[in-house]
Image (tube, helix red, strand yellow):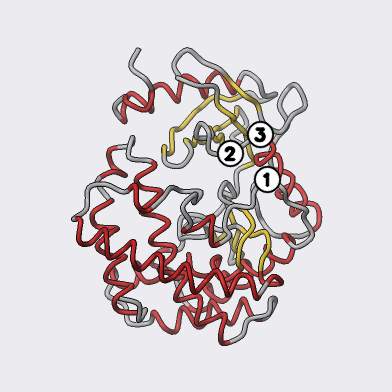
Amino acid sequence: MIPFAQASERSQAYRLRKLAMAVIEQYPLAIKKVNYIQNGENATFQLIDKKGKKYLLRVHRYGYHTTQAIQEELQWLISIGKSTDIQVPQPIKSKSGTHFVIVKHPAMSHPRHCAVFHWVEGRFLWKHTNENYMHKLGALIAQLQKTGKKRKIQHRKYWSIDGLIGRNSKFGDLEDVIGIPRKQHNLLIRARDSIYEMMILYEKNNPKKVGLMHADLHFGNFVVNKGVLGAIDFDDSGVGLHSYDLAIPMRSLAFFTEYEKRSDLSQLCAALLEGYAEHMPLNEKDIQHVKTFQAIRQLVMLGWLQSRSDIPRLKKRIPIAAKNAMVYIKDNLDIL
């Protein structure tokens, strides 16, 4: 059998479905329908039981998290569910009483960690994005960070400056990216090195601004239901500088407003920051560094796209992602 990473995207989806069916057998659920959602960082499926209740099945990417790191994520979600009214996915116990299972299947090259969650109802915003919702999103980010301060995390210390853009970054080294012009690649590496030197000092001097956070609240990872925002997909949650958490939805806003030809980017970003500042400290220097973190996010995503180049549609995005990162850095940071 062709190794999973070398199989076509269609073949990968077929194999993942076979694995999903094996996972379902380990849960006390009467599932009648299994809908494939996507295969990106993880593979996800929507499950529907005989009463119409929905669940999410997540198949973890092989080797991305340790067992202990997955446990820390799930325990944080459980804690949020017990101590707040924030809408987040709640993991379901398997028949053996665990919140995740490790399944080995002939269709897969390696065993996979898998978890099943209660479905978080809601719709994605996209065209309905406005200042009110961005204010709520800023508040949601801050509230999640507040709950994160109460957690002792040992295995998800991913998003330090070293973890983001150091030589052993979690998502992969920028220097390993292939498929872009050499001159552009060298400029991006030079920019990365300049940003690293600047931000490593900011991190060292601001230990109170470091903590557990969602770290991936782009527009596909939060939903709105009856005016209330809920956060989903905590797979990338980890410890890092809080401002990075704000940079991610800001990048989503930048791409979204440009695509929709809207002129309210600054107002939407201001509303996001205002909502955040109502719950967590935020000074002018932090806000300035959010701009830097937006550059970091783009460099991080280049490393991630390279690490997922086994998925053809993601591999194709590398050149445009590199071009966008270069344009942003030249326009917003005085380092090249």
Asked whether 195 or 80 is in front, the reply is 195
Q: Which residue is mark 3?
A: 67
Amino acid on which the number 2 mark rests in the picture:
His
Q: Are marks 3 and 2 in contact (CB under 8 Å)?
A: yes
**Residue 135 image offset from top left, x and y in percent:** 56, 76
State the CA–CA distance, disc 2 to disc 1: 9 Å
Label 3 CA crowd tier, 10 Å (few <14, some 14–19, many 20+): some
Amino acid on which the number 3 mark rests in the picture:
Thr
Report the label total. 3
Instruction: Specify the quadrant of the image occupied by residue 190.
Output: bottom left
**Residue 76 image offset from top left, x and y in percent:** 72, 50
Is any part of residue 111 visible from this angle?
yes
Q: Are marks 2 and 1 in contact (CB under 8 Å)?
A: no
Residue located 63% across and 72% down the image: 139
Instruction: Specify the quadrant of the image occupied by residue 32.
Output: top right
State the CA–CA distance, disc 3 to disc 2: 7 Å
Amino acid on which the number 1 mark rests in the picture:
His
Residue located 77% across and 51% down the image: 79
Q: Which residue is mark 1?
A: 155
Q: Is residue 224 above or below residue 153?
A: below
Q: Which residue is mark 2?
A: 65
Sequence-earlier tag: 2 or 1: 2
State the CA–CA distance, disc 1 to disc 3: 9 Å
